[in-house]
Amino acid sequence: MKRILAVGAVVLVLAVAGIAWFLSTRLDSLVAQLIESHGSQATGTAVRVGSVSIDVTGGRGTIRGLRVANPKGYSRGDAFQLGEITLGIDLGSVRSNPIVIDELTVSAPKASYEVDASGRSNFDAIKANLDRGSSGAAPDASEGDAPPPRIAIKRFAFQEGTVSADFSAVDPKRQKLEAALPSLRLQNVGGSKGGTPAELGKTIAAAFTRAVGKTVAANEAGRATEKAVGDKLGGEAGKAAGDLMKKIMD
């Protein structure tokens, strides 16, 4: 009996070790695949991930090099890149519904705002895709399929972001805009009941696209006002007034 128990214990340890090895070697790639597939479906364009690193026991994770390509009709570059995403998971909630993420931070996001000949931006196109996805009926789960996990994010932040804006399709003489993105902070994303990954992704992406649009609009308004003041006053007085207006808008 002791020998049987000993053999059983060894088999159990090997099984646990095998599961742990599978999680440590496969979980990162599985998460990356989920981000790419669900992200591409939601935004209507290609979503790619550079790398994913998940520490299951520590409840920490890092996603690097997440890129969202421009939709059709725009340049072949990316609409935005999310440099590094870090998250902390409430380990006590892993077996609960919703799973609670204490904090999710996106560092150094880069947005490339582009306007086509009709005046429509790439971010308008992505937001339209997101809206279409959120208004459509959710597909029914197949019999026996588990429903998607619900997730609640306590604190969410974009920080140290930049945006470049290209209006050359409508005005070849207009200079490219480069501006800093203000920090964006959200709390209790998904609420107490949480949301599906697709729902949370749409909420966060919509908030980011709005922030980019507002930043571009504010800086364009400031640049137009600066030019108008300079043209009106002329000379050194116009330049000084324009510089002052620029500081105010920044």
Image (spheres, helix red, strand yellow):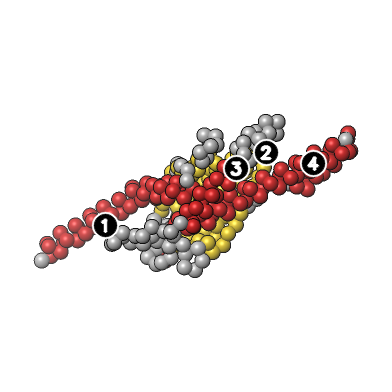
The amino acid sitting under disc 4 is Glu
Q: Position of residue 169 (x, y in %)?
A: 63, 34
Circle 2 residues within 10 Å: few <14, some 14–19, many ≥20: some
Which of the marked residues, 3 or 2, is nearer the chain's N terminus?
3
Disc on the earlier residue, 4 or 2 = 2
In the orientation shown, which residue stands out farthest toward the top?
A: 173
Q: Whole-Å distance between the Cαs marked 3 and 1? A: 51 Å
Q: Earlier in the sequence, mark 3 or mark 1?
A: 1
Q: Which residue is mark 1?
A: 16
Nearer-N-terminus badge (4/1):
1
Q: Are marks 3 and 2 in contact (CB under 8 Å)?
A: no
Name the residue that disc number 3 marks.
121
Q: Secondary structure at mark 2?
A: strand
What distance separates the C-alpha of mark 1 from that of mark 2? 55 Å
Neighbours of disc 3 within 10 Å: few (<14), some (14-19), many (20+): many
Task: List the residue tagged with mark 4.
Answer: 226
x, y (%) of residue 52? Answer: 43, 47
Q: What residue is pinned by disc 2?
A: 177
Up-down relation of residue 23 to residue 242 (above or below): below
**Residue 48 picture quarter:** top left
Q: Is residue 195 visible?
A: yes
Marker disc for residue 105: none
Between 234 and 151, the one nearer to me in the picture: 234
- Mark 4–mark 2 Cα distance, whole angstroms, equals 14 Å
Of 28 and 172, nearer the camera is: 172
